[in-house]
Structures are given as structure tokens and as C-alpha cells.
Image (cartoon, rainbow, N blue to C red):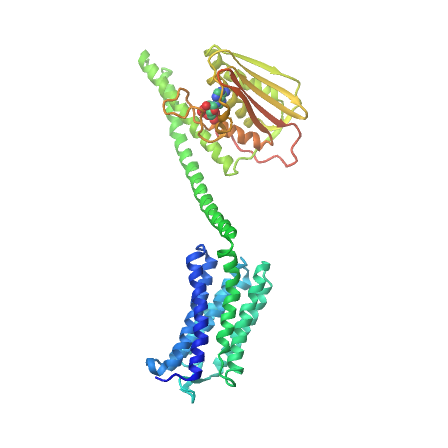
């Protein structure tokens, strides 16, 4: 088999372009993260690779026993789709999704299919025959073929224009790719008949490099960008998982609350003697049922609260509140718990101006802190102080209890974290109270911190801004515990 000089040049030029496309394709597929943009780039390179291979095969039609018309159709179709795919990739790269880009992307693909169908029914190019140059074939464009070619050229100009005008400035350089592809077509029409140099393949290689440059730079050779991308992907995955978790938690918590309330309610009725007298053992066991039921209900309510806060569904209903009044209400309710343990409750309230807070949430904050102080104190007292300090209201809950090691000051504010994490721990609790308390304080624009010494006691401090908030009062959200 003798290979003409023209065939050798065509094979070399298309071979080089094919190698560039294949190299870019493999680099991106194996090295870059799996993202729509990278996959679109890989597809564009695959189409270009196919086009170059079809061109090479086109020089050996007789030797390979191919159909000259079909080989030409395949090459022309691949070229059309290369230009469309190039545009779709560019708009994905620029994150540009407008009506224009959608029409040019989808519209281009549909028109491309119509074009292929017309070509296969011999309405685009006819009379494909060998020329005097061995291995070379030539056909005649029909009127439809000429029109389609003009439309394709217009599409490439429009692509360049639209890509150049995209909002992302990085996309601007990509507009050179369709210009180069168009220059390739023009060279194949104007220059090829004069001197048989396949400039088109070179132009296409250049346009592949223009498209590949930002992909290589951002996705492959910039480890930071790659890392950022991986982090962003991971984040998106995590936030999807987290929102699914939140939804699950909301659903399950509400489902749990109703039967729990019913269990507690009916047990209390039985305990109250409504269905007949109980002996001591029965009374004692039912009391345990109620106590455990209430612990479980508190856990469920805490979980609902925390979930609301984390998903941004909890808004504060702020109004002017007289803090000592709230503190007294809380302490009056909770005092019996302290008295039962032989603890003294002390109140030390200074002159405090009314402040804008959500009263229900303030009560929840103070209740959590005082309940903890009582729970973790065996002798001595629990003191609640309130004062106004440089424009803020300062609350202090002081106990003489077991204290907290300094290395646990941060962890106790984390979800489900307790100083004694063992399964045999002495104190009941969910480990959510302080997490919720801190979030509620922060929602108010305040701060919570503590001082403590093991064996001597702890003091939890809260500072709440006394100034009226600038934002309008938010929608009313009923207390989860209500
Ligand atoms: P819990 O439901 O376990 O009390 P919290 O989030 O309210 O959950 O508190 C977390 C942990 O912080 C507690 O388990 C306890 O170890 C520690 N803690 C909180 N308040 C005090 C306190 N006043 N004295 C000693 N330890 C405390």
C-alpha cells in the first residue's frame, strides 16, 4: 500500500490533534474531580478525538472497505457536535444558565440531530466520489447543506459572542475556541484546495488547548483550587446529609412526643387513684414510669429545640422584659428541687432596666442553668445574681457543687457532651441543655462563659445586650416544651 504525501500530512495533522484531545481527556477523567463541568470537557475532547479518527479513516476508505458517504457523514456530524459541546462546556464553566445558553445548548443538540437525519437521507451532501488525489473524496453540498453550513458558522460566531459576554471573566478566554474552530472550517474551504495542508486539524488542536487551559489550571495544576473544590463537594454532601438528619429528627421527635405525653398523662391519672387505689409498690413503680417518661420527653423536646435552632427555624419573639420578674418565676418553680436536696436558693438582683428579650427563651436559659446547678450540687447553695454592667445585663448562676475541670469548659457546650461520659454515670441528663442555652444566648446577641474549680463549685455567666434590637420583632414561635 502506497501512502500519498497528502494522506501522510492529513494523518499526521489529525493524529497530533487526536493525541492532544486524548491526553486532555485522560488527564481530566483520571485526575480532576468528577464534576459536570469536567465531564462535559471530557465529552468535548472525546468528540474531537472521534472527528480526527474519522478524518484519518477517511483517507483509507478503499483499503478499509468503508462507505465514503457514511464516513464523511460521521466526520461532519462529529464536527457539528464538537462546536455545540464546546459551547455547553463553556457555559457550565462560567456557571452561566440563562435562556440564551439553554436555547443554544439544547436547541443546538436538537438541530444537530435534525441535521444528521437529513444527512443520512442524502439531503445535505450528494455525489461523494474519489478525486485525483488518492484517498481523497469530494461531494457536493445541496441547498440544504449550504444553508446548514451557514447556520453552523453563525452558531460558532454566536457562541464566541455569548461566551465572551458571560458574567464570569474567566470564561472570556474560552470564546477564542469557537473562533479557532470557525477559522478551521474557513481554512478547509479556502486554503485546502490551493495547498493541501490540513490547517483545520491544527486550528482544532488550538481550540482544544484553549478549552483545556482553564480546566488544567483550575482543576489539575492548582492543588488549592482542587482542594477547595473537594471541600465544597464534601460540604454540599454533608449539608445534604445534615438537612436529611434534621428532617428525620423533626419527624421522629414529633411522633415520639404524642405517645409519650399520653403515657405520662394516663400514668398520672392511675397514680392519682382515678382507676382505684394503689398499693405502695404500685405507686412507687408508676412514679418511676412518670419520672423516666418525663426525662425522655425533655430529651425529645431538647432535640426538637436544637434542631429548630440549627435549621434557623427558631426566631425570637422579643419584647420588653423585666428580668427580675422572670428570674423569680423560674426560681419559685424550681425551688422545691433545691429544698428537697437541702440546698439554699439565694437571689441577689440589682437595679436592672427592662431589656428586649424573648421571655420564654430567657426562662428556658435560666431554668437550664439553675437546674444544672441544683443537680450538680450536694450541699451549700445556689445563688442567682443579676446586675447591669456597662450597658449589658449580667446574669450569674453560682453553685457550691462538684465543679468542672478547666479542660472541659468548652466541651460541655457541645451536643451530648458531659464531664462524665461513662455509661455508669451518676447524673441523668441528655447533654443538650448547655448547647441549647448557648445557642439561645447567642441568638439574643449575648455571651455565655463559666468559671469553676473542681470540688468547689461553678459560676455560669451570661451577658445580654440591654439595647433594643434594630431588626423588627420576629414571628412568634411557640416553645417546644409548651
Ligand atoms: P446535662 O443534661 O447532662 O446536664 P448539659 O448540657 O446541661 O447536659 O450539661 C453538660 C455537662 O456539663 C453536664 O453533664 C455536666 O457534666 C456539666 N455541668 C453543667 N452544669 C454544671 C454544674 N453547674 N456543675 C457541674 N457540672 C456541670
> x, y percentage for residue 8?
42, 80
Between 420 and 92, the one nearer to me in the picture: 420
Q: Is residue 426 above or below residue 153?
A: above
Between 471 and 342, the one nearer to me in the picture: 342
Number of numbered discs on residues: 0
> x, y percentage for residue 46?
42, 67
Q: Is residue 342 above or below residue 179?
A: above
> x, y percentage for residue 414?
48, 31
Residue at 44 percent of width and 60 percent of height: 27
**In-image side of 69 versus 388 (left or right):** left
Of all residues, the one furthest to the right in this rendering is 390
Q: Is residue 391 visible?
A: yes
Quadrant occupied by the N terminus: bottom left
Where on the picture, by quarter, is residue 35?
A: bottom left
Q: Is residue 482 visible?
A: no
> x, y percentage for residue 150?
53, 77
Where on the picture, by quarter, is residue 290?
A: top left
**In-image side of 135 versus 309 (left or right):** left
Of all residues, the one furthest to the top in this rendering is 342
Amino acid at each position: 500500500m502506497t501512502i500519498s504525501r497528502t494522506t501522510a500530512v492529513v494523518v499526521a495533522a489529525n493524529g497530533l490533534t487526536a493525541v492532544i484531545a486524548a491526553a486532555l481527556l485522560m488527564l481530566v477523567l483520571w485526575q480532576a474531580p468528577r464534576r459536570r463541568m469536567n465531564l462535559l470537557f471530557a465529552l468535548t475532547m472525546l468528540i474531537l478525538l472521534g472527528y480526527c479518527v474519522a478524518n484519518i479513516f477517511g483517507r483509507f476508505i478503499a483499503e478499509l472497505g468503508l462507505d465514503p458517504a457514511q464516513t464523511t457523514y460521521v466526520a461532519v456530524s462529529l464536527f457539528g457536535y464538537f462546536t455545540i459541546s464546546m459551547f455547553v462546556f463553556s457555559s457550565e464553566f462560567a456557571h452561566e444558565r440563562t435562556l440564551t445558553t439553554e436555547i443554544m445548548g439544547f436547541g443546538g443538540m436538537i438541530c444537530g440531530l435534525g441535521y444528521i437525519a437529513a444527512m443520512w437521507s442524502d439531503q445535505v451532501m450528494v455525489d461523494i466520489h474519489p478525486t485525483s488525489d488518492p484517498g481523497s473524496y469530494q461531494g457536493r453540498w445541496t441547498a440544504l447543506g449550504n444553508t446548514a453550513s451557514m447556520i453552523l458558522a453563525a452558531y460558532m460566531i454566536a457562541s464566541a459572542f455569548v461566551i465572551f459576554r458571560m458574567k464570569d471573566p474567566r470564561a472570556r478566554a474560552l470564546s477564542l475556541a469557537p473562533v479557532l474552530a470557525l477559522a478551521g472550517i474557513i481554512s478547509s474551504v479556502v486554503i485546502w484546495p490551493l495547498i493541501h495542508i490540513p490547517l483545520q486539524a491544527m486550528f482544532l488542536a488550538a481550540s482544544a488547548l484553549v478549552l483545556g487551559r482553564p480546566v488544567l489550571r483550575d482543576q489539575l495544576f492548582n492543588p488549592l483550587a482542587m482542594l477547595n473544590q473537594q471541600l465544597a463537594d464534601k460540604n454540599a454532601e454533608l449539608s445534604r446529609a445534615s438537612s436529611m438528619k434534621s428532617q428525620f429528627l423533626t419527624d421522629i421527635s414529633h411522633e415520639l412526643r404524642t405517645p409519650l405525653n399520653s403515657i405520662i398523662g394516663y400514668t398520672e391519672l392511675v397514680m392519682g387513684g382515678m382507676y382505684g387505689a394503689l398499693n405502695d409498690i404500685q405507686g412507687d413503680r408508676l412514679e418511676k414510669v412518670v419520672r423516666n417518661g418525663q426525662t425522655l420527653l425533655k430529651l425529645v423536646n431538647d432535640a426538637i429545640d436544637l434542631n429548630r435552632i440549627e435549621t434557623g427555624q427558631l426566631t425570637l419573639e422579643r419584647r420588653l422584659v423585666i428580668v427580675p420578674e422572670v428570674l423569680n418565676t423560674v426560681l419559685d418553680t424550681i425551688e422545691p428541687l433545691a429544698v428537697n436536696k437541702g440546698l439554699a436558693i439565694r437571689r441577689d438582683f440589682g437595679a436592672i432596666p427592662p431589656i428586649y428579650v424573648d421571655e420564654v427563651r430567657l426562662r428556658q436559659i435560666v431554668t437550664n442553668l439553675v437546674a444544672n446547678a441544683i443537680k450538680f450540687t450536694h450541699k451549700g447553695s445556689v445563688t442567682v445574681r443579676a446586675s447591669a454592667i456597662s450597658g449589658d445585663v449580667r446574669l450569674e448562676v453560682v453553685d457550691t457543687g462538684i465543679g468542672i475541670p478547666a479542660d472541659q469548659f468548652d466541651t460541655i457546650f457541645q451536643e451530648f457532651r458531659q464531664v462524665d461520659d461513662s455509661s455508669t454515670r451518676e447524673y441523668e441528663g441528655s447533654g443538650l441543655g448547655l448547647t441549647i442555652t448557648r445557642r439561645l444566648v447567642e441568638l439574643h446577641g449575648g455571651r455565655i462563659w463559666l468559671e469553676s474549680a473542681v470540688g468547689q463549685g461553678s459560676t455560669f455567666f451570661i451577658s445580654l445586650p440591654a439595647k433594643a434590637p434594630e431588626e423588627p420583632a420576629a414571628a412568634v414561635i411557640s416553645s417546644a416544651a409548651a
